[in-house]
Image (cartoon, coloured by chain):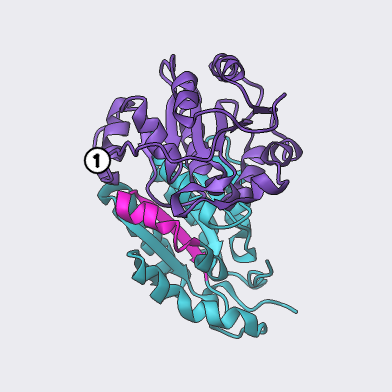
């Protein structure tokens, strides 16, 4: 799946992937699963190099919902990374998290909402938040690096300490424009 | 080897779990959930009543969290067909403590016994083998099921997937709790984890 490349002109304060890795480690996340997205590429690399975290590459995003539930049954916390187009693949599997009140933390990079070149990304972009809310998830959103770090920290507490099912949407404006 | 399925699914699951020790079991939506409950409710069982295609992958997350325990994903042909990509994901993850057993009646038994792909040439064991599973096999007799029960109690080099061909029939339902929060918390308590 194609996704935006991070901006080449980043400030130190924009190193949000490192901050997210630090926060998720502090929250004792032990499993990470993902369908690749360029916006998540640095976080994926950091988790893949982390020997204390088991990383699973998925063929479709809903697999990560099931893995997260299994991890929790076995006493571990899991985080799931995807882009907005993948949210549509997850809906029925989210029944598991919702009806079982399984802690769930999904970090979703948005496409199709800000300086998007590919019109095929737009319909699922529009459906992302309503469909997540329709199946029972709490949706949180961040548009700046500072806000994202704080939001994910709060979302991790809500998910793992309060048994909530949370999707954090990472605005496409934050990730930057894909170079075509 | 008989190519016509003759096994009774309840007898198969009873033989498979006769000496389960501390094996953790996740059962797939439909008959496998009833089969698992029919041989005796157990705190180490997690029963699915939905989330079709998720049984083997819940098993993966569980196996990764509990590397010292054997984990069994007990599912049906329809449920595993919906999670075909998961076989690739499990093949790449390569857990050494996860087995997938497909109780294969070659039909969608819960919805009117429509024929499924596995009776029309689709071979889940060949897919698993191509995805790098450490062992695969298809079982037709009760003696083979008994040998399989002993085999899956032993350590493995990687994930294994076995298909057991059974008669297409619906035995009387044996219904576990449909309260997933209760089953989840009971399962976690069984492993020593507190409820939130």
Judge by depth and name the residue closer to the eye, A139 or A11. Answer: A139
Q: Is residue B173 left or right of residue B128?
A: left
- Picture coordinates of residue B158 (x, y %)? 65, 27
In the displayed structure, B171 sits above or below B139; it is below
Q: Is residue A157 visible?
A: no
Q: The chain coloured purple carries which letter?
A: B
Residue A137's spot in the image, x, y percent?
35, 64
Q: Nearer the viewer, residue A15 or A66?
A: A66
* Image height of A171 relative to B81, above or below: below
Tell which of B180 and A24 is nearer to you: B180
Residue at 41% over, 45% down: A69
Residue at figure coordinates x 40%, y 31% from the top left: B36
For chain A, the rendered hue is cyan
Q: Residue at x 42, y 27 (%)?
A: B24
Residue at disc 1, secondary structure: helix
B6 drawn magenta? no
What residue range appears in magenta?
A: A90-109
């Amino acid at each position: 799946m194609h996704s935006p490349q991070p901006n080449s002109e980043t400030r130190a304060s924009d190193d949000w992937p490192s901050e997210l890795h630090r926060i998720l480690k502090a929250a004792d996340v032990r499993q990470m699963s993902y369908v690749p997205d360029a916006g998540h590429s640095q976080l994926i690399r950091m988790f893949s190099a982390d020997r204390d975290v088991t990383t699973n590459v998925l063929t479709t995003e809903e697999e990560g919902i099931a893995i997260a539930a299994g991890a929790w049954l076995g006493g571990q916390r899991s985080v799931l990374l995807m882009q907005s187009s993948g949210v549509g693949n997850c809906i029925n599997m989210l029944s598991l998290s919702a009806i079982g009140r399984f802690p769930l933390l999904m970090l979703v990079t948005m496409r199709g909402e800000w300086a998007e070149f590919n019109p095929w990304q737009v319909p699922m972009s529009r459906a992302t938040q309503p469909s997540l809310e329709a199946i029972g998830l709490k949706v949180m959103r961040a548009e700046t690096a500072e806000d994202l770090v704080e939001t994910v920290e709060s979302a991790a507490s809500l998910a793992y300490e309060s048994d909530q099912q949370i999707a954090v949407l990472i605005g496409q404006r934050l990730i930057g424009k894909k170079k075509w | 080897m008989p190519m016509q399925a003759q096994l009774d699914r309840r007898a198969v699951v009873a033989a498979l779990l006769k000496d389960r020790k501390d094996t953790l079991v996740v059962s797939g939506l439909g008959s496998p959930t009833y089969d698992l409950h029919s041989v005796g409710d157990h705190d180490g069982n997690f029963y699915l009543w939905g989330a079709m295609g998720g049984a083997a992958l819940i098993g993966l997350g569980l196996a990764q969290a509990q590397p010292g325990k054997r984990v069994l994903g007990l599912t049906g042909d329809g449920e595993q067909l919906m999670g075909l990509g998961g076989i690739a994901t499990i093949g790449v993850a390569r857990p050494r403590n996860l087995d997938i057993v497909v109780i294969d009646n070659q039909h969608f038994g819960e919805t009117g016994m429509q024929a499924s792909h596995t009776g029309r040439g689709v071979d889940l064991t060949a897919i698993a083998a191509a995805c790098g599973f450490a062992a695969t096999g298809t079982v037709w007799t009760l003696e083979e099921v008994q040998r399989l029960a002993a085999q899956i109690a032993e350590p493995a080099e990687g994930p294994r997937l076995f298909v057991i061909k059974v008669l297409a029939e619906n035995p009387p339902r044996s219904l576990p709790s449909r309260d997933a929060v209760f089953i989840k918390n009971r399962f976690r308590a069984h492993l020593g984890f507190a409820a939130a």
